[in-house]
Amino acid sequence: MMKELSQRLLGPVTFALLALTIWLGLWVTPPDKVQGNLVRLLYVHPAVAWVALYVSFGTATIASCLYLWKRTRSWDMDRIAHCAMEVSVVFIILTLITGSIWGRPTWGVWWAWDARLTSTAILGVLALGYLALRRANDDPTLRAKRSAVFAIVSAINVPIIHFSVQWWKTLHQGATVFTSNRQLLVHGSMAWTLLISFVGFTLLFFWLLRARYRLEVERDAAYRAAFDEAVSLRQREGVL
Amino acid sequence: MPSTETSELSPVAPPKSPSRSRWRSVGVLVVLGAAIIVLLSQGILHSLNYFETVDQALAQRSSLGTKVIRLEGVVKPGSISRTSNGASFVITGSKDRQVFVDAHGSPPQLFQADIPVVVVGHFTSSTSLDFEGTQILVKHTATYIAAHPKRVKAPNGTTR
Amino acid sequence: MIRIAWLVAKKDLRIEARSRVLLWQVVPFGAMALLLTGLALGPAHAGNSSAGPGLFYLVMLFVALLMINRSQVLESTPGTRASIATLGLDPAGVFLGKTLALCVELWVTGLVLLAGTVLVLHTALHGAFLALPSVLVTLGALAAAGTLYGAMTAGGEGAATLLPVLCLPAFAPLLIAGERAFSAALTHGGLWEWWVIVVVALVAYVGVGILLYGVLEES
């Protein structure tokens, strides 16, 4: 009952929270003391990056681990890893694009070779590599194992990206939300809007993941049906 | 010599029980990952830093010479003046260490007094404290405060 | 494990010694690529050694891609994987052996290209000599990573084109560390922090390879 309800509500709640974020972000929250209206990207870029690095890449990594571990091995895990990584690619690209749009007016450049930006770009290429690796192998077991190993080895980059602004001096600002002394550096209604944007984009990830997962299940079923039909056709022709 | 090769390929003992080696592999992977993270967190690899602060640059002033570097400091209020091909200003580090910057090109939109900036350029001579900049980047902090603070309430209800 | 590693390495090196693919195909390619970097820099900068270390490693990465691919092609002749599986050879040993063979091949090519860097890009001979240990360790890490990623792509569709996509992002830290260590050797600056990174990368890739190479091979 609860499960069905939450399934049904996921889409509408996601939509409502993102609409609320847009309304609060564009009309209600005040301009920043230094950045003026540029601050409104605060309600998009950090939340998108959060989904890209931690929620989706994290989901893909955990699902990959669970697949490799024999006791929890199932095709569902492989499928979840695949779908989460696909969503991750979209969100990493969005992170780079929104960051670039923000960087140009604030820093003065679209791109800087600092540790945070460079490592994020490398993660994007790794995620694309994961998808390319999946396409290259036909044997489903081999594909699942190889891509799981690749995802886990690539995941070492995520903590490096996270801590890059602490370990090295970067042009990118330090942590906004997860600061080392647990002090939120965002004030007033800006903080609330930021929080809502995080929840909204996280739900959007799960909504996208679910949609992508269902598509993958349908695709597998269609493939199997087509295969069975081809076999029975051959049998009727007397080939097999 | 085919005879020695075939003798080397005699049957070998089967691999150890998979469950034990699997646990061991998980353990070793975790230790390796942790070791890399710990190493990186020890503040090594300074040359991955995007810039030198004013303090760092002045501390190693003699070895820097006129090499092109990225120099970071806070723009001193009241020191900005427009020049024919850009702007000149003073950036400060901790205590009153400061560097005079003469930068070419138009500064970014957010450039103003009291903001941290990164200037790409070089010192004008191997001893001088004047810096010639070719590009100014504004390094924004992670603090966000409303432009009109009186109108905003903090999450706990107080007005900032 | 060590015995199998030794066996596999000897097999790979023997194939190399007989086929001479490295000598007649890969080394000339590397030399040509190095010449092209000089042409790309233009006459004013080609003799300027500050770009030398980076270009050396860039060429080395492309050369390594060819050699990783070659190393995996040796395994993909019909029946090889099946016979390894039926013989019950320890995959960790196979990984170590292939890494060792690839490492030796990379060292040979690396030495030739290092000499080429000194000749063509006018990198200081003394500095190149000082950088040699770090180059050897970096190439070792490259061999371990390459064998791991090579096994991931082996036998798949378009393995040769997939390999760079998977490898190059993972090689980026090795390129940075190797380049910095080499540059530091040229300027007599501090080397040790880059040494740490390269050694850690070597240990990490060898460790991951020993643990997970078997997973990549079984279907």
Image (tube, coloured by chain):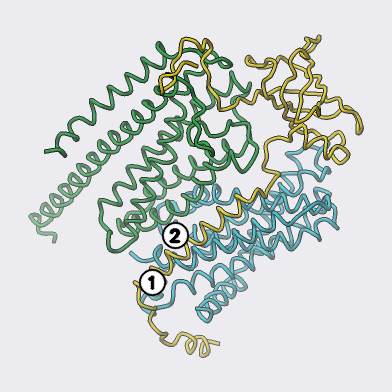
Chain colours: A green, B yellow, C cyan
* Amino acid type assigned to the residue bearing label 1 in the image: Gly
Circle 1 — which element?
loop
Q: In this view of the protein, which residue sits in the foreground, A105 or C65?
A: A105
- For residue B148, side relative to residue B126 (left or right): left
Near mark 2 (Cα within 10 A), the count class, few <14, some 14-19 or many ≥20, is many
Marks 1 and 2: which is nearer the front?
2
Whether callout 1 and callout 2 share a subunit is answered yes
- Give the number of the disc on residue A123: none
Residue under label 2, please give it.
C154
Near mark 1 (Cα within 10 A), the count class, few <14, some 14-19 or many ≥20, is few
Q: Position of residue B13 (x, y in %)?
A: 40, 84
- Give the number of the disc on residue C79: 1
Circle 2 — which element?
loop
* Amino acid type assigned to the residue bearing label 2 in the image: Ala
Q: Is residue B151 visible?
A: yes
Q: Position of residue C41 (x, y in %)?
A: 76, 38
Seen at 64% across and 61% down, the residue is C199
- For residue C143, side relative to residue C36 (left or right): left
Q: Is residue A121 visible?
A: no
